[in-house]
Amino acid sequence: MKPAPFEYVAPTSVAEAVAALSTAGGDAKVLAGGQSLVPLMNLRLARPAVVVDINRVAGLDAIGVRSGLLSVGALVRHADLAAHPDVAGWPLLRDALALIGHPAIRNRGTVGGSIAHADPAAELPAVLSVLGGSVMAVGPRGTREIPAGDLFLGYLTTALAADEILTEVRFPALPGAAGSAFVEFARRHGDFALVGAAAVVSLGRGGKVADARLSLIGVGPGPVGVDLAPLAGKPGAEETWTAGGELAAAACEPDSDLHGPAEYRRRLAGVMAGRALARAAERAR
Ligand SMILES: Cc1cc2nc3c(=O)[nH]c(=O)nc-3n(C[C@H](O)[C@H](O)[C@H](O)COP(=O)(O)OP(=O)(O)OC[C@H]3O[C@@H](n4cnc5c(N)ncnc54)[C@H](O)[C@@H]3O)c2cc1C
């Protein structure tokens, strides 16, 4: 199918892009890598009157480390970020990037696009959530920082206003000696995951759990955080990770769909979460 007719604008600055969004009065879409927007438009599930192509906007493709944060410009492609030397210090992000689609999608798709699109099965929103990161957004009312906890509002929905552009994604470093892991299950290599889990684990004295965090994908309208407080002080051992998996299964609210019933996804969430916690603990120092 072909998209419905639309007006195409290609601004060269963030200010011009914001002006184009404002002028369109809510009936515009930002075009970044196009890996999600273009299929939606071709299927006529999205019919924006105006498409604002930000690929010529200068300054949105920088990657750098500042005060313990990895700063990633919205237009940075998944593949370019994965190949950047600074990502070595963000192993959870590196693991997650390798799980996104196929090489062609990673060559074109952008970090800002993945976050702004907020697909419930996308890896990067879970990474941003479990690390407690944030995004920078620019709109007609100025620039604001939105913490991950306030950003993901529901299915394909974020706190970004229709006239705001996401310009930068900020990933905090793992705390001290923490380990991390991203584990997911997909029916075929390169498919969106059915269920996935991003885990961060810190072990304290005697190898006991000092801190454990989880964010799940594919089991709710957005990344699903799990309260793992009951694991604090427990031994860093298999039964603890299994218990973490049970907490994860209880925390998620999957829907039934053509891939399987809700109970299947819930069970898978428990298994993926348990494995992610165990692998993260193995990597903790
Ligand atoms: C076959 C296939 C498999 C895929 N598998 C996966 C997968 O396993 N995991 C995964 O995470 N993703 C997957 N994707 C999606 C891919 O990662 C895309 O990169 C991502 O969904 C969107 O990024 P994009 O740059 O292409 O955004 P676009 O498609 O250009 O935009 C997506 C949405 O975000 C908005 N947007 C984009 N950038 C901005 C911005 N800077 N500010 C404000 N709004 C913005 C757009 O307006 C649009 O609504 C897959 C895609 C395909 C086609």
Image (cartoon, grey):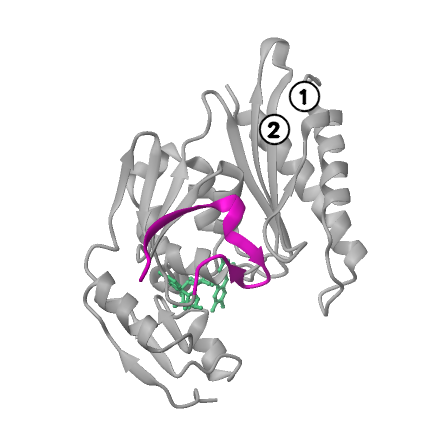
Please state the extent of the stretch shown in magenta in the rendering. Answer: 140-161
Q: Residue at x 43, y 87 (%)?
A: 3
Q: Whole-Å distance between the Cαs marked 2 and 1?
A: 8 Å
Callout 2 crowding tier (Cα within 10 Å): few <14, some 14–19, many ≥20: many
| Residue 220 visible in the shown view | yes
In the displayed structure, 280 sits above or below 209; it is below
SS state under label 1:
loop
Question: Which amino acid type corresponds to the residue marked 1 in the rendered image?
Answer: Ala
Residue 114 lies, with reference to residue 26, above or below; the image says: above
* Residue 8 point in image, percent of width and height: 29, 81
Q: Is residue 158 magenta?
A: yes
Residue 244 x/y as whole percent: 71, 33
User: To which residue does mark 1 refer?
Assistant: 232
Q: Vertically, is 138 above or below 231?
A: below
- 164 left or right of 152? left
**Residue 24 quadrant:** bottom left
Q: Position of residue 31 (x, y in %)?
A: 35, 70
To which residue does mark 2 refer?
A: 212
Mark 1 CB within 8 Å of ligand 1? no
Tell me if mark 1 has few (under 14), some (14-19) or many (20+) residues whose alpha carbon lies within 10 angstroms of its own.
some
Rendered residue at 38%/76% (across/down): 25
Mark 2 and 1 residues: CB-CB less than 8 Å, in contact? yes
